Image (tube, rainbow, N blue to C red):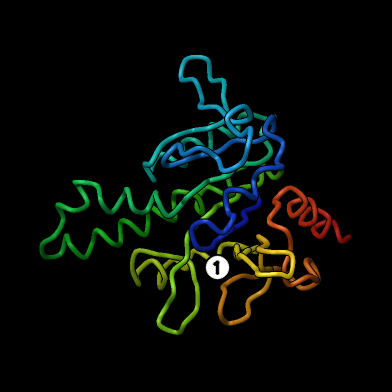
Amino acid sequence: MAKAILVQGLSGTGKSTSWRNMPSEESMIISPNGKQLPWGGSSGQYKPVNSTTGKGNVIVTNKLLEVPKWLQWINKAKHVKYVLIDDYTHFFNARIMSPDFLAQNNGNAAFQKWNVFGADVFNSVFGELPNLRDDLVIVISHHVSLNEMGKYTFKSSGKLLENTIDPVSYFTYVFHSRIIKTDAGMAYKFQTNDDTTYECKTPMGSFPDFLVDNDLYPIIKRINEYDQGL
């Protein structure tokens, strides 16, 4: 079963940038929008997959139901160890704004479409994890929203998703991207444990520091060490 890591936070707080030091030759990105990655030289490291040759390491699709197919394709590529599903929120948006979804606006269909949407979200990644290689690490970046309790949490498209699936519960590691004001200026960090304002969690003793640099490569190394009892 593949490892799953959630990186969530407001837009512009360093979620995608945290991928900058990952070994691109062992990495694959699934992007719903194909946006340029936010660091210098990224266009040389990450290129769209060529449908003819299969070469490349960026898959561009905004279709939620295509994600399992691409994960299975990546699963067969033994050189790939790390997968970033970037802007997962945008997959949600594309699904609920699609013509067929919007057309179901009357009677029972209007209610049932949200059950189908919940199933689609579950099957897109969470239902697929047990079928993927143990040495594969799946990182999902996602946006947050401020809930009625004044807490920044996983941005969903309705209570059904929160109550029936609770996506955050499928992750052992949830990091929250933050921008911290310091004497030296603004620092981009990941918060490792919940403080009732920012939703995040890591196992006891895995990350002693409350804030760590937003750099996924050492973070994943630390997770692997922790899993080995180090």
Could one spot residue 1 in this view of the protein? no
Residue at the image position 49 percent from the left and 20 percent from the top: 50
Could one spot residue 28 in this view of the protein? yes
User: Between residues 39 and 104, which one lies in front from this camera angle?
Assistant: 39
| Amino acid, disc 1 | Ser
Residue at the image position 49 percent from the left and 63 percent from the top: 167
User: Between residues 1 and 14, which one lies in front from this camera angle?
Assistant: 14
The quarter of the picture where residue 39 lies is top right
Give left or right: position of 17 versus 134: left
In the rendered image of this protein, does residue 28 appear above or below residue 1? above
> Residue 168 at x, y = what percent?
53, 66
Give left or right: position of 119 versus 128: left
Give left or right: position of 138 versus 156: right
User: Between residues 224 and 207, which one lies in front from this camera angle?
Assistant: 207
Which residue, given by chain and number where applicable, does mark 1 sit on? Answer: 169
Helix, strand or loop at label 1? It is helix
Quarter of the figure with the C terminus: bottom right
> Residue 183 at x, y = what percent?
74, 70
> Residue 209 at x, y = what percent?
78, 70
The quarter of the picture where residue 113 lies is bottom left
